[in-house]
Image (cartoon, grey):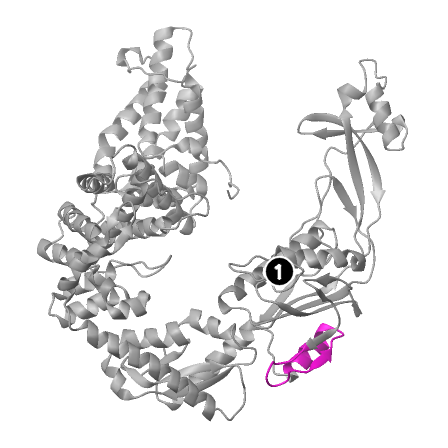
């Protein structure tokens, strides 16, 4: 018989954050470390200008891809470091072992019961396997797997040198990078974000010879495209950093980010102004330059007659400029731009940017003045010519649905005045036909508010027009006014119900109508603390939205209500996950019917607090013991005359007391008190288990005791499905 081998193969961690010595492994091998001096790896990919919006994700992919491949190769390494500018992607590892770790590799053969007969003699299967591996049958070992015991052999495999492996691995790392849009620029057929112009690959002071996209790796890099375009030789990362900086390139995006903030603050102070905080725009600037220089320009103050939002949009969206504000929040006739040229002679650059901005502001002023010739109300008729969705009709038809749906929601939540709700719903899409919004789509809603105020509409109506698009992104600001909240929920619910009604259901990563984002925004509005829409029955609102679509003959109800409710319940789950709530606690409360989302959220938060109490674990153990005993499909009534034992009577009294008092707590939304009442069952439930045999031979007594436990389950089930609670500390899903 073969000797008994190890039951599990050993493998190291592939986490690149581990210190030197951490290695990758597979389920088939275990590594044995080898001593050696680690060397430094430096890779630079020189490219034509990479778009700023893909830089962050590209650097993340580069870091994770390198770590994953080196771990899989079982090469010990220090944490991967990545840097980048528009013209280069940089990967460096301060410590990368010179060789793969020697490992013991297991080669699996036939099952043990196939390889040896009942007397322990080898069968042709075992003999053939041993022969194919060049070993004697006596050298075979037994390995325990998920499918049972299998024969195997173990052989020591000496690792290859890192330098040899990198020739193949580095091109694989580059090939693994993905981009929203790629280019092909030569006969190699390689797709990359932009054409590659040079590659530096140095390991241990020596070039790693490989080619990618028709470019051969070497030791030559280049400086700033304008200020120092010449080549220079690279030997190691320290000297590279020093030389590249001397050649006007700051490779660390965070250093460029901080420098931009510092220079802008200095220029703003000179103008006695301030920069509106916009982290996204600063990162955009940092990823567009290799050596940032802030330049302050100005524009004609007459343009300040145009609404502030329009000027800011013209600066940010089209040019990436930073507007300056006075201490009172009003715009100054100045802006700051970030250029890729640290020269102190910036006059030409400043004038060029001023000319460009002036052209944008002239256009914006023209559109604004043109828009004012027509009122929002007069534009609504034009929505008949704008398609909302091919199967769902026009934006005018959408407005016709939003108006009654908004009034329904307002009535359900006792929000007044209803005339303003209807007016806001009627006007809310009108600004989509304005010149300013066509030029600056991000201003939809904002321009509607501005024009409504100028036309003398009620301020609550104007505010709701802007707020009904909120939140504009995950984690964005929520509408603050009651009418704005009503309109936002109506608009989002109409879109979700309509898309589900015609089969446009999100799947996987496909969500062209951003239904997940809109659904989450809807839930966030409904569950916000103190939100006036908390009383809204989401079930009723969904049915009303379906009724309005049916009135326009867009689709028939079918299972739309069920599908939409299930979809929105998942958005509640996403909301709770973002709040950091354990998945098993989320699953517990999501077993409840979704009607008023805040109830699920408040129950989950109460359960989180309750789960930290010492009694929680023991209570769940007792509860699960109770429900395991109850036969599937069991139903019965408690017959008090059959409660002969004291422990039966005590449990019955406890259940009755809870049943009589818990209703008020449900009405008042006092969910923690409900859990505290359920916790009082712990002692009588445990005494019940200790004092009687539930499955008594007498059928009447047995059914009566099962009815007691069934009542316990019913009380818990009203709160959620506690069978989903993971006892102990659950692992993340």
- Asked whether, in this view, residue 694 is left or right of residue 375, the answer is right
Q: Toward the viewer: 686 or 129?
A: 129
Query: Does 247 appear above or below 641?
Result: below
Residue lying at 46% horizontally and 30% vertically, measured from the top left: 621
Q: Residue furthest top?
A: 698
Query: Does 177 appear above or below 146?
Result: below
Residue lying at 33% horizontally and 17% vertically, measured from the top left: 707
Mark 1, secondary structure of its residue: helix
- Asked whether, in this view, residue 289 is left or right of residue 466, the answer is right
User: Dot 1 corresponds to which residue?
Assistant: 63
What percent of the width, then of the height, locates residue 477? 31, 61
Q: Is residue 520 magenta?
A: no
> Would residue 540 be seen by someone viewing this image from the given angle?
yes
Mark 1, residues whose alpha carbon is within 10 Å: few (<14), some, or many (≥20)? many
Residue interval drawn in magenta = 222-245
What percent of the width, then of the height, locates residue 507? 43, 43
């Amino acid at each position: 018989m073969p000797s008994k081998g190890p039951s599990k193969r050993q493998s190291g961690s592939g986490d690149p954050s581990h210190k030197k010595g951490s290695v990758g492994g597979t389920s088939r091998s275990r590594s044995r470390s080898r001593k050696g001096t680690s060397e430094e790896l430096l890779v630079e990919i020189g490219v034509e200008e990479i778009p700023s919006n893909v830089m962050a994700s590209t650097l993340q992919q580069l870091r994770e891809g390198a770590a994953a491949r080196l771990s899989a190769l079982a090469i010990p390494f220090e944490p991967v470091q990545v840097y980048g500018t528009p013209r280069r992607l940089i990967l460096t590892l301060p410590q990368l072992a010179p060789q793969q770790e020697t490992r013991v590799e297991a080669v699996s053969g036939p099952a043990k019961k196939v390889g040896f007969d009942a007397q322990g003699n080898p069968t042709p299967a075992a003999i053939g396997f041993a022969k194919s591996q060049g070993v004697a049958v006596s050298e075979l070992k037994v390995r325990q797997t998920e499918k049972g015991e299998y024969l195997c052999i173990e052989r020591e495999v000496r690792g290859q040198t890192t330098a040899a492996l990198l020739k193949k691995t580095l091109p694989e790392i580059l090939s693994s990078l993905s981009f929203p849009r790629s280019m092909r620029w030569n006969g190699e057929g390689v797709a990359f974000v932009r054409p590659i112009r040079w590659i530096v690959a140095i390991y241990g002071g020596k070039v790693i010879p490989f080619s990618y996209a028709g470019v051969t790796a070497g030791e030559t890099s280049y400086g700033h495209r304008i200020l120092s375009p010449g080549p220079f030789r690279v030997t190691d990362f320290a000297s590279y950093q020093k030389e590249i900086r001397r050649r006007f390139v700051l490779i660390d995006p965070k250093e460029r980010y901080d420098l931009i903030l510092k220079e802008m603050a200095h220029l703003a102070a000179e103008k006695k102004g301030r920069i509106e905080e916009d982290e996204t725009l600063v990162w955009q600037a940092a990823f567009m330059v290799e050596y940032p220089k802030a330049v302050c320009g100005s524009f004609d103050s007459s343009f300040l007659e145009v609404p502030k939002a329009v000027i800011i949009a013209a600066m940010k969206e089209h040019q990436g400029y930073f507007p300056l504000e006075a201490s009172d929040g009003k715009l100054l006739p100045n802006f700051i731009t970030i250029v890729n040229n640290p020269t102190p002679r910036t006059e030409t650059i400043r004038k060029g940017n001023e000319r460009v901005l002036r052209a944008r502001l002239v256009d914006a002023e023209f559109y604004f003045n043109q828009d004012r010739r027509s009122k929002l109300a007069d534009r609504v008729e034009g929505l008949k010519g704008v398609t909302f969705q091919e199967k769902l009709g026009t934006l005018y038809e959408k407005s016709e649905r939003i108006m009654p749906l908004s009034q329904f929601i307002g009535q359900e939540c006792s929000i007044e005045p209803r005339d303003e709700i209807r007016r806001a719903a009627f006007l809310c899409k009108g600004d989509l036909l304005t010149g300013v919004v066509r030029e600056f789509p991000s201003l939809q809603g904002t321009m509607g508010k501005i024009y409504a105020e100028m036309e003398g509409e009620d301020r609550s109506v104007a505010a709701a027009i802007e707020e009904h698009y909120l939140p504009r992104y995950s984690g964005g600001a929520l509408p603050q006014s009651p009418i704005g909240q009503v309109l936002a929920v109506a608009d989002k619910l109409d879109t979700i119900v309509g898309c589900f009604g015609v089969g446009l259901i999100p799947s996987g990563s496909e969500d062209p109508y951003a239904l997940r984002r809109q659904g989450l925004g809807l839930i966030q509005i409904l569950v916000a603390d103190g939100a006036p829409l908390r009383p809204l029955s989401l079930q009723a609102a969904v049915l009303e939205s379906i009724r309005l679509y049916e009135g326009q003959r867009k689709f028939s109800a079918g299972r739309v209500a069920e599908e939409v409710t299930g979809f929105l319940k998942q958005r509640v789950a996403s909301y709770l996950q973002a709040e950091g709530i354990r998945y098993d606690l989320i699953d517990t409360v999501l077993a409840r019917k979704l009607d008023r989302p805040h109830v699920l959220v408040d129950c989950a938060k109460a359960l989180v607090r309750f789960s930290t109490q010492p009694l929680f674990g023991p209570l769940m153990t007792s509860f699960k013991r109770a429900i395991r005993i109850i036969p599937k499909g069991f139903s019965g009534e408690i017959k008090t005359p059959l409660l002969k034992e004291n422990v039966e009577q005590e449990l019955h009294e406890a259940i009755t007391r809870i049943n009589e008092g818990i209703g008020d707590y449900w009405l008042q939304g006092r969910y923690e008190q409900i859990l505290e009442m359920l916790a009082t069952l712990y002692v009588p439930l445990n005494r019940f288990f200790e004092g009687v045999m539930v499955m008594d031979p007498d059928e009447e007594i047995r059914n009566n005791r099962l009815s007691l436990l069934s009542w316990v389950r019913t009380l818990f089930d009203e709160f959620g499905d506690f069978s989903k609670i993971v006892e102990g500390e659950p692992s993340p899903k």
